[in-house]
Amino acid sequence: MKCPVDGTTLVITDRSGVEIDYCPQCRGVWLDRGELDKIIDRSVTTPPPAPQPQRGYDDRGGYKKKKRGSFLEDIFDF
């Protein structure tokens, strides 16, 4: 299957028993019918562990906060 954005061949990967199509070029993610519901159901039944705060020092010697990524980073390992 081709990416609708840039025409690159999509890669199929398995995440928690759900097959996901993604484009390695533009990093777009495409789901077939029912796959989003499966991902949501599985995320509700098994909540992810609470993230541990990661602190580092900024240039002035104080703490800096780590910027939170998108929710897709919690689901996919790209």
Image: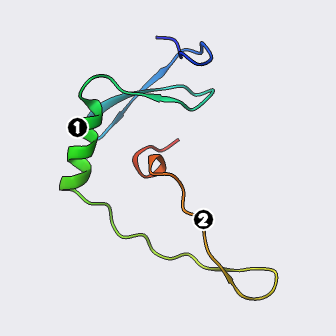
The answer to whether mark 1 and mark 2 are in CB contact below 8 A is no
Residue drawn at (48%, 44%) of the image: 77
* Residue 23, image quadrant: top right
Residue that mark 2 sits on:
67
Q: Amino acid at mark 1?
A: Lys
- Image height of 68 relative to 23, above or below: below
Residue drawn at (61%, 29%) of the image: 26
Tell me how far mark 1 sits from mark 2, CA to CA: 28 Å
Q: Position of residue 40 (x, y in %)?
A: 26, 45
Q: Is residue 56 left or right of residue 3?
A: right
Residue 76's tag is none
Choose the circle earlier in sequence order: 1 or 2: 1
Q: Secondary structure at mark 1?
A: helix
Q: Amino acid at mark 2?
A: Lys
Residue drawn at (51%, 12%) of the image: 2
Q: Position of residue 54 (x, y in %)?
A: 55, 75
- Image height of 6 relative to 21, above or below: above
Extreme residue in the right direction: 59
Q: How many marks?
A: 2
Q: Secondary structure at mark 2?
A: loop
Q: Position of residue 72 (x, y in %)?
A: 45, 46
Q: Is residue 20 left or right of residue 2?
A: left
Q: Is residue 65 left or right of residue 3?
A: right
- Image height of 8 relative to 44, above or below: above
Q: Is residue 32 left or right of residue 75?
A: left
Residue that mark 1 sits on:
38
